[in-house]
Image (cartoon, rainbow, N blue to C red):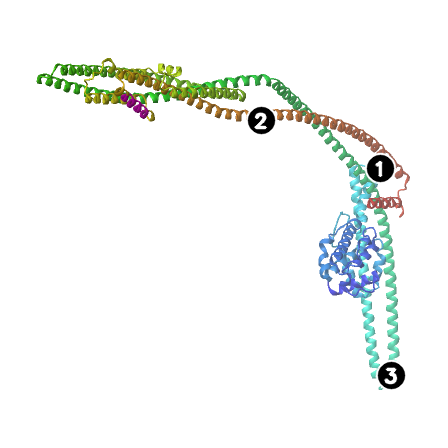
Amino acid sequence: MDDAAQRSLLLWSFEDIGAASVASMTDLCDGVLLARLMHRIDPEYLNLELISEHTGGNWALVASNLKALLRAVELYYHEELGQLCEASELVDAHLIAKQGDAVEVAKLAELVLGCAVQCPGRSEYIHPIMQMDASEQASMMHLIESIMHRFQLTSPSGGGGSSARNSLANTSFSYLGHEGESAESLAAQLTLALDKAAGLELRALDLEREKRELTERFEDALRAKQALADERAKLADERDKLVSERQSTLARDNLKIQQIVASEVHALTLELEERREELQRVKREASERLMVLENEVRRQADELDISRSKLGQLAKLEASVAKYKKKLEEVAALRSQVQDLEVHNAQYLDKVLDLESTVKTMPTLKALVERYKNQVVDLETANVEAVANNQVKDQKVRRLQEELDSALGGKEFLESQVEELRSQLASMTHSGQDDALSGGGGGGGGGGGADVTHLASELDMALKAKEALQFSLLQLKQQNDELSDELLQARQQQQQQHRHAAASALTTAATAKATASVQAAAVQTDDTGAAPTATRAVTGVPGLAPPAAVGAVEQQPQLVASAGVLGALSYAPTSETVSSGVAAAQVAVYEEKIQKLVSGVLQVVVDGAWRHELLAAARASVATIREGGWDAAVDAVQLWLLSLLAFVVGVQAEAEVVDSMRVTVAELTNRLKDKESVINELSEQRAKLENYTKKTLHAVQTKYMVAVSSHRNQITEKQERVDLLEKKLKEIRTSYSREQALMMSSFYERRTMLPQGQGPGAGSWLANKRSEERAKRRNA
């Protein structure tokens, strides 16, 4: 848009708005003045309450005003003029609000100009254009022509406003449709109506073209008038120059020229007035024709709107029918869901019953568990006892092995003693023979014979002791083999008991505690019973052995045999009376031999600290022999050795029993702790399982009963709604069919009552009806 067009547009805006402050396009940037002009054109499309008159330089308020104005212009072009005008895309409101761009303001003013020159009251907006100069009129005409042909029409009927264009074809359709004609005839009549509208539009264009030609001629006349005025000014100048030279001639010529000019100006003025009158007449005829066409188009548009409203109602009813069908399908789906829920509920009830029956069988299961627990406890107790017996037997085997080793050492010692005695006997025999040969006395020979007899008897006793030791060694080997077999059998029994214990999963804490308490009491009684025995055995060393010790000695035959050998060795000298003639050297030799035998026997029987005590006792017995005789010493030594052996065997047996019981108690205590932890875990799991079962059963029953009842209520409510909607649908269909019949009959009667040729005011009733409906829609 050039500057001349902008100035013309600004002048037109100034004259229409009537604002004295409009000096340039930037004064229209706030959109207030153009909004007022749009409100004057059609107040229905723009409410001035949405326009902020005092923006205060706030570009956001300016942008809001411009957007409201652009929306009103778009709606007016679309609804009233029937043109597709995207005003928000053509005009940049933000650029105007922020920078005050004059080009964008001119575009907006041009759109408002298009609304003004095509509105029903366009005469009052065209009149200021006619009062402008020729150049300004030309630029304004160019703008109007460009804005009228710029946008695409929403309907194929061409030219004019939307209500005029859209209603022309629609009115013919609805007007002729009342008589019940066929679709082909209606289409043909619609084509004729469209052709007629096109002819009218062509006529309007011809009138516009004639108007432009008259405007051009008027501009030519104005230019001729201006040229004549210029010529007159020149002639006046020439006259002033020639006044002094040819005053009289020039005066007469000037009068003639003035007359000619006046006559020409008068003729041109008359011609101009004639042309103006002709132009006004053509405008009046064109406006009258346009009014007639507009009334006809409005009437047809009203009829078309009525038919469209009916079609809309019909579409809504069809949509409601489709919705009801969908709702019926949903109800059927809900019914199937409810049936599925009932089936699931029945399944859950069966599960609940199964769980309840399972809960009822819990006491019997508990009894079985308790019985199995008792069995497991018994088996484990037997297992522990077998383990303890195996340990005791292992200790016995180790002890017997040690005794075997010590017996073998004693055997070697006795063999060495026998060899020494043999060598001494041989030496003594040779010495006796030497004494006899040398002529010794009879007393000496008798003494040597006694010594030889005594040595022979000692040698025999040593051989007997060797045989006894060999016999005891064989017995020890046999006992070792028997103990090995028993140990193997005990280990096999232990493995079987372990397998039985692994097969059982539970145990009872009470039974284990009772067993442990009983065994602890037994151990305590055994300990308390063993302590006095040991005390009696220790304190009763000089006397006889107690019964427990005697029993222990009877259970250990190898120790008894060893004791018998020792007694034989110690008692052997008592079979012969020691004569006073035995030499002190021989007595010392015998004492040394006795000490050696006692020490060998003591190595077989005991070891450790007891060996020193026995050696001391042996020395005391030797001292007794020296002082009082052999008999008392041998008896004392035999009694003391028997009591000592009985005490040692009893102490060892009681120690073994105590150790086995302690091992048994420790094992049972550990297993009792393990079983108590297992029992606690099982009791916690059982409590959790019972709580979970109760909660699950209660939750399942409550949840599904509530769900079933709620679904049943929903189904009944939806069924009632469906019934109500079906009833309403039937009523709507009956009322719609009745109204349709009434409307068709009324249209037919009105068509028959109306004359064939309608006057200009024939569609006034429909126009009023249409305006009322439009007002109702906008209010809604």
Q: Element at badge 2?
A: helix
Quadrant in which residue 606 is drawn: top left
| SS for callout 3 | helix
Q: Position of residue 662 (x, y in %)?
A: 44, 23
Residue 710 vs residue 465: left or right? Answer: right
| Residue drawn where x is 8% and y is 17% of the image | 437
Viewer-closest of 378 and 632: 632
**Alpha carbon distance from label 3 to label 2:** 148 Å
Q: Name the magenta segment's main secondary structure.
A: helix
Along the horizontal axis of the image, is 468 left or right of 240?
left
Instruction: Report the front residue among 456 and 71.
Output: 456
Q: In which quadrant of the rendered view does residue 660 lie?
A: top left
Going from N to C along the chain, the mark reached first, 2 or 1, is: 1
Question: Was residue 612 drawn as part of the magenta stretch in this picture?
Answer: yes
Which residue does the image show at 88% across and 39% down from the upper left? 751
Query: Which of the labelled discs sits on residue 423, or is there none?
Result: none
Looking at the rendered structure, the kind of residue marked 2 is: Glu
- Which residue is under mark 1? 179
Q: Position of residue 339 (x, y in %)?
A: 68, 24
Q: Sort mark 2 into few (<14), some (14-19) or many (20+) by Cα contacts within 10 Å.
A: few
Q: Is residue 336 among what the camera can see?
A: no
**Front position among marks 1 and 3:** 1
Which amino acid type is shown beneath numbered disc 1? Glu
Q: Which residues are magenta?
A: 611-623
What residue type is disc 3 on? Thr
**Lower sequence index among marks 1 and 3:** 1
Residue for badge 2:
684
